[in-house]
Amino acid sequence: MYNLLILAGDGIGPEVMEEVKEVISWFKDKRNLNFSVTEDLVGGIAYDNYGTPLHDKTLKLAFDTDAILLGAAGAPKYDDLPFEVKPERGLLKLRKELDLYANLRPAMCFDALAEFSSLKKDIVSGLDLMIVRELTSGVYFGDPRGIMDDNEGGRVGINTQRYTTSEIRRVARSAFELARKRNNRVCSMEKANVMESGVLWREEVQWVGDNEYPDVELSHMYADAGAMQLVRNPKQFDVIVTDNLFGDILSDAAAMLTGSLGMLPSASLGDNSPKGLPRALYEPVHGSAPDITGQAKANPCACILSFAMALKYSFGLLEEADLLARAVEQALANGVRTPDLLQIEGKNPATTSEMGKEVINCLNDLS
């Protein structure tokens, strides 16, 4: 029995999650995988119903489940809420309370989409890299923080970049473990030239490499140079490990190498629960997309591929995860595209549900 908690959230979250539920049903029916699915609320819809973006009962469900599938959080109608109850705070609280410190952001370019990237086809064709972003510390969580008077008639905004040895080493280990299953190379990115936290980051990642993973090739790069290299020669990288702030920026830059945010999944992993499975949350990289909410234009592929990551990293179902990824690739190769990916003259875009149905059709064909 695999226990799943679905938090569809706001905006296009419920729309793309409906297609994931169809995929889950397919694996139940065709592969005899026994999923027990529970659903609850997070983000703006949780605030509307519970008065908070993440209710305590939802957090308890998150602790008790094997994996969480999340759609999106946020919408313009909540922009004027106090900071502490904005929809996004629900997602941040989930990550922090579950201690999901390793954010896995794959950047893969399917052959069918190589010409859709803003870069030349030969630069992105066959791209397959993984960014491991530290997710529960750094400048987004460090104290002191806030906006206050500066005693000179103005104000000052403060955020603190803070890392400890243990925080750096554990996310580094995640990156090295992933590299061992890929091409055995890790590139660590920071700003050791101007930031003491960057000096510590470089030293601690090097310590982990020297003492625990001497078989993995380790290199270091300043994060700004890394951003340049991502758009110059992205296939030089296998696994990139970096801190929370730089990981946020670099992973979005890598996302556009593939042509659309609508194609990119992510996983946020922590230490193992008492059941022996990692605490885990899977979500598409795209946001709630309020400009297309309710119009059947949303691309469900990133959310579907997030479920594929759950099959792989939470349940160890490597064959099923690969099958689902190949079904998405085949659906695209068949020319079925939502509006964000449509570059075929005279062809109408697929709706969200049509895209999902084509993935199911390809699952049937490939299996």
Image (cartoon, grey):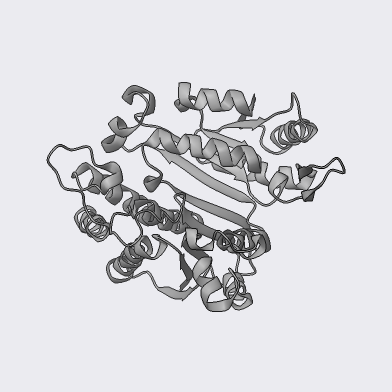
Residue at (42, 61) in percent of width and height = 11
Percent x, y of residue 303? 40, 56
Inspect this view and state whether residue 75 appears. no
For this view, does 67 lie left or right of residue 122? right
Task: Using the rendered view, name the quadrant where residue 62 is placed.
Answer: bottom right
Q: Residue lying furthest left in this view?
A: 346
Q: Is residue 259 above or below residue 33?
A: above
Residue placed most toward the observer, 350 or 281: 350
Is residue 290 visible to the viewer in this orientation of the structure?
yes
Q: Is residue 312 left or right of residue 166?
A: left
Residue 169, quarter of the rendered image: top right
> Going 67% across and 63% down the picture, which residue do you hit?
84
Q: Position of residue 140 (x, y in %)?
A: 69, 48
Q: Residue, x 22% and y 42% (percent of image)?
A: 333
Residue 286 at x, y percent in the picture:
44, 50
Q: In this view, does 171 lie to the left or right of 23?
A: right
Residue furthest to the front in view is 153
Tell me where residue 366 appears, x and y as whole percent: 23, 52
Quarter containing the C terminus = bottom left
For the image, the number of numbered tags is 0
Q: In this view, does 110 lie above or below 44?
A: above
Q: Which of 260 and 218 is in front in this view?
A: 260
Vertical placement of residue 324 versus 53, above or below = above
Q: Is 325 drawn above or below residue 63 in the view shown? A: above
Task: Pick whichever, 71 or 270, lies toward us.
Answer: 71
